[in-house]
Image: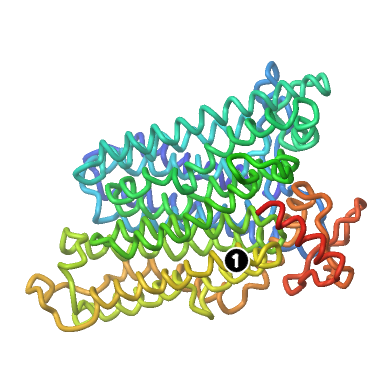
Amino acid sequence: MQNHILSIILFTPLLGALILLFVPKENKDAIRWIANFFALAGLLVSLPLVPMFWEKVTSGDTAPFKFIEGAANNWIPSIGAGYVIGIDGISFLLIMLTTLLGWISILSSWTAIENRVKEYYIWFLVLQTGMLGVFMALDFFLFFVFWEAMLVPMYLLIGIWGGPRKLYAAIKFFLYTLAGSVLMLLGILFLYFHHQHVTGIYTFRLTALYQTAPHIYSDYGPHVATLLFLSFFFAFAIKVPMFPFHTWLPDAHVEAPTAGSVILAGVLLKMGTYGFIRFSLPFFPQVLADQTPHLGMTVRGWMIFLSIVGIIYGALVSLMQKDMKKLVAYSSVSHLGFCTLGIFALTPLGISGSVLQQINHGISTGALFLIVGILYERRHTREIAEYGGISNVMPIYATITMIMFLSSMGLPLLNGFVGEFTILQGTFMENWRWGAWAVPGVVLAAAYLLWLYQRVFFGTVTNPKNEKLHDLTPREVATFVPLLIMAFWIGLYPKPFFDILKQPANHTISMARPDYPLPPETTVNAAVPPSASGMTHYSPTAVPSTPATAASKSAKAKGTN
């Protein structure tokens, strides 16, 4: 089983979709039970991966990717495409998040979807397979197939089962994402032919492209390399989404069904940040290190600037919203701004904090969309002004909401604090000004979430329509329990997650910044020895403090800024 664990996880949801094809559409209860069974099965078959991967971490396995299946050219040998999948610590955590939120999303749909039930669950399970494939693929052609495969199901989920403006939102989502995908395809083809030019071999194998892609800067010059970086940047920035490519997100979230919003915020947006870490940083280290200004700033400076603007802008716009779902949607722009800030800080702490915050965002914001969806099912309105005093009639619901709000705003002892603090620490180590500009986003998050809670839950029930709202059902409580457990686990004991992320974070930085300085007193994990190239494995408590290191980093930071 261990040799094919990833394929089993990948195709379990697709098997469920195929079985649903043979179930009569009139038998809605059977369809719901089968879909929920395969969603839960997808989670359960992924659980053995946890001890398997942990054993790799603790045994000192230094291979960049683990559980590799397939081989180059075993799928379409004429073009050098292969079915090659594998994971590292980053993709492992994202896969576990995907299987968890996939089950929760499908479970939450039990009473919310009444029309075309069969098609809904089929497309949701197909979407699950597409998302898992993106995080597993180690062949660029295979990655692109999965990247595009998840686009159609999400388009249909919004366009068929969405709200009043569902077609507008679905088409906007589709066109934005497709535009970025076309640019990324051009970039993939450039890397593909450049690799052939250098080695004489046609291949989409990711580990092979890691060796040749950085040479594009010297072979074709900085302008071509920068344009190539931008071809990937637009695809990933639209998916995140980074400011100013975020305008499709509020419409998609507001019009999507509740489960669609949960999976969109919890998993689909992470494909953009995952793409930055997996492809943009290792492929274009010289572009990010280049001190040549473009429109007044370096490429890396622009990435940091757009991240900080997204943090502040998303939080300010959230403060002004009158629709709860749109407020949560704009909060995603702010929270994911922290994730991209950590990525482009280009420090091991920044990368680790970014990935952990992506997991945190999936947990917290996924729960927030479930919270909004539960009220919408009962009242069919998301207007904040329609509510007040809800804690008097739905105390369990109000308690869970408060916990997830505190999680989302980064309260210590909950998951959001650990991710944001690590990102800010990694950013301050690189340039204190970047961190200082990002910190107000934390304060604003507390402002819009606490103000929302005050208006919806505190006081007396002023609207007679809210007086007889029933509290959470056991099924609805079940959707929150795993999210609450994860929020407290990461907040109270995040060490296992940092242990999992330690090696891939260092490996990514070793490719993106081969000369990244770490102090000699940095603690080296005994289970993960330094590589032959001299790469040092960071300690989460280490801060570069030697005079030479500080001077070197200060000069670089000023140049980038």
Classify residue 67 as left or right of residue 467. Answer: right
Give the residue at x 41% y 35%: 176
| Residue 225 vertical placement versus 295 (above, below) | above
Residue lying furthest top in this view?
Answer: 78
Q: Is residue 427 visible?
A: yes
| Number of numbered discs overlaid on the protein picture | 1
Q: Nearer the viewer, residue 191 or 402?
A: 191
Q: In the rendered image, which quarter is residue 48 located in?
A: bottom right
Q: Picture coordinates of residue 4 (x, y %)?
A: 66, 44
Q: Nearer the viewer, residue 231 or 83?
A: 231
Residue lying furthest front in this view?
Answer: 296
| Residue 104 vertical placement versus 220 (above, below) | below
Colour scheme in use: rainbow
| Residue 346 vertical placement versus 298 (above, below) | below
- Name the residue type under label 1: Gly
Q: Picture coordinates of residue 458 (x, y %)?
A: 23, 81
Q: Secondary structure at mark 1?
A: helix
> Which residue corresponds to mark 1?
435
Task: Assess disc 1: are there few (<14), some (14-19) or many (≥20) residues with their C-alpha within 10 Å of its C-alpha.
Answer: many
Q: Picture coordinates of residue 7 (x, y %)?
A: 61, 42
Q: In the rendered image, which quarter is residue 402 located in?
A: bottom left
Q: Picture coordinates of residue 532 (x, y %)?
A: 92, 52
Give the residue at x 21% y 40%: 26
- Image quarter hosting the C terminus: bottom right
Q: Nearer the viewer, residue 32 or 166?
A: 166
